[in-house]
Image (cartoon, rainbow, N blue to C red):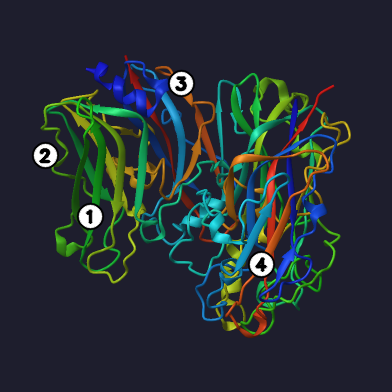
Amino acid sequence: MLYEPRVLWDTPSSPLPTSTRVRLDRDHFRNGEPFDHVYTHILIAPVGIPHRSGSDVSYGANAGALYDVGVRVRFPERYGRSRLALNTYGFVGKPTATWYPNAARPYASSGLVNIMAWHFRKSTPLLPLASPEIAFTQWARSAASTADIDDVRPELSMCLYQKHPWMGSRMGTTRRAGTNNTMLFSFGGLKSPFPFPVGPDAGAYDIAADAELVGSESIVFAQNEMAASAGAPRNLGRQTQQQLSAQITGFGITVDQIDLDDDANGAGGAPRVYMPLQNMAGIQVRPPRSAPGGGRYWWRDYPVISLVCPTINDVAIVHELRQPIRLMSGDCAEVELATGTNNVTVDTFRTLFNIGVSMCGYAEIPVQ
Amino acid sequence: MSEHLGPILATHAPALCTGRLYEPRLLYATLNLPVGGAIQRFDSNVFRNGERYPLHLTHLVWAVRDRDYGASVSTAEEQLQRVQARLTWHDSWYMGFDPMDLPLWQNQQGIAIPEPLASGAVTWRFLRPIELPTRAAFEVSCSLERTQLEADGTIPIAVCFRGRGIKSRQEFMFASRRSLGFGNANGGLDVNLQIVPVADFTNDGVEPIAITDMTISVGPQTLDTSPVGNIRLGRINVTMIQGGTGTPFAQNRGTTSGAADVDCPAVLWGVSAGRAVVHVIPDGGWILEPGRGFDAEMLNLNASGNFNLNVAMGAAGYLVVP
């Protein structure tokens, strides 16, 4: 049996009004592959919404988006995990968060080191010349640029944790997005796939939904960058290392947004709370056709990073399923969101929600 | 004496019930990382087993030191995001040929302490309990990283060990605290090494005790209105007397920057929970036979500005005494 990570996910295509019950697209929670999926975690993330208070222009109870929404998940051949939609904090259960920001930077909504990770329950092979290409969407704001933070360029680094048979230990290969050609953050009229809260209006947030397509300029870690290359004996040389196979045991993603948080806080003369960009940028993994699993994408489209990181995660709720859910080919889960009466009425907040829900697990692919 | 550990180990870590004596070890040192991205390497002796018994390393730990290094040096914790590290040994690299951002080394789940204490406390839950024989004690020394930052006042440093009686299975806690002066008016205690009363950590009972946890906290300055402690201000070392090997648990065998470095930054003791980046060495850890070790390198990603860094690194584990 061959294992590959899989994530089923969805985000409402339009903001949710109050006191509404919405079923997410069933096809987005369907196993459309000709083999079984096993899901081990449910994640719920406030997509594109800052979750940390700390300034007079924050949402006030700005965690409202998560506190006020209910989630109900039903699986085939089960009556449902719960009769009613559970409030999201009912799903809290796994201590995945890392450190809070330094007390000197209360406005920093990202974690102290801003790391997210998924350590796979089942490792997946990484064969020579068949390493995946990993792409991230651009993080763009929909509003007009704010000069103070125009030139801020957060940097993203990612590594694949690998286990090498000859070392018996877990290694990693990593690439860091540079600050020039490959910068991944841009202002200036580009549309974001998700609502983005920092507007030009001197402090209030504009989170009007921009249901636009993913920006055309994404950052891509190419296959040769994500090859099995770590920990190999030094005398083999790097080229030779890339011809060695390994098992991927997980991945980690970190975003350095220190400058963004600092500068946004001072922009426009008003303190602003920003957000972890892992809740804004989408990620896609594209195995090559020559990959042993047939080259299927690990998940559809571009879920935000926080929806695919059930092991270490500062911003999403991670619920570990004590009894993993098996979706056979064609099965689907049903996910409903129920919004309450959010009493947060800051002008531009518009009492809207945008919640992402995902299920993380793995595919069991029979080996011929 | 170590046969007493059997029942405890059987419940605490079944695979480790081997009848050996284990003593924590924390190899540590600090590296100056100037801006500009040049790779800096630790003294080769730092992460080397200089004792006569095998050393089982289980965790790697990093933190930015909070000392007064001058205006050109940043002591901000979040600067850990801009440091990369790489280990080399046995002709191979870890985790990869390319130095890897420190956040990507963080793989310890549940590392955060609740926010009210988050910046002031660390915990090390011992994978392998320490046996504290009757009449034995821990000698805990502590000091502060810097002095005279503010007006008078004291900084409390508290240490707590928790364990179970090997025969009675009763829980024991040993705790004590020492207030260190933070200004001249307090007699200049500041950075000098202080010994927490040994009597507070003495096993004066009738049975050996298996110590399973250790917590250190550094509280807020007594005269300060801020309720927030700062674990990075403290330095700690522990030695078992009348038991164990009699060697300090934390050891810096590299080039030191003076007597002020005799104690290990308290933040590095946060192997299980605290404020440091913690890398759980996968697949059970590494065994360093006597004389063996690895080299560690780090670099500062800041290109310019007052962002020179002093980053402390530790390698935590257990000395395995047959």
Which chain contains the residue that carries disc 1? B
How packed is label 2: few (under 14 Cα within 10 Å), some, or many (20 or more)?
A: some
Which chain contains the residue that carries disc 4? A
Tell me which residue sits at (54%, 60%) in the image: A89
What mark, if any, has residue A338 been given in the picture? 4
Q: Nearer the viewer, mark 4 or mark 2?
A: 4
Residue A308's x, y, as percent? 68, 49
What mark, if any, has residue B190 been given in the picture? 1
Position of B63 with respect to A279 (left or right) is: left
Position of A63 with respect to B123 (left or right) is: right
- The CA span between labels 4 and 3 is 53 Å
Residue carrying label 2: B199
Point out the image quarter for the N terminus of chain B: top left
How packed is label 3: few (under 14 Cα within 10 Å), some, or many (20 or more)?
A: some
Tell me which residue sits at (53%, 49%) in the image: A96
Residue carrying label 3: B287
Tell me which residue sits at (14%, 58%) in the image: B187
Q: Tell me which numbered mark, 1 or 3, is placed earlier along the sequence.
A: 1
How packed is label 4: few (under 14 Cα within 10 Å), some, or many (20 or more)?
A: many
Q: Nearer the viewer, mark 4 or mark 3?
A: 4
Amino acid found under the numbered disc labelled 1: Asp
Residue A347's x, y, as percent? 64, 85
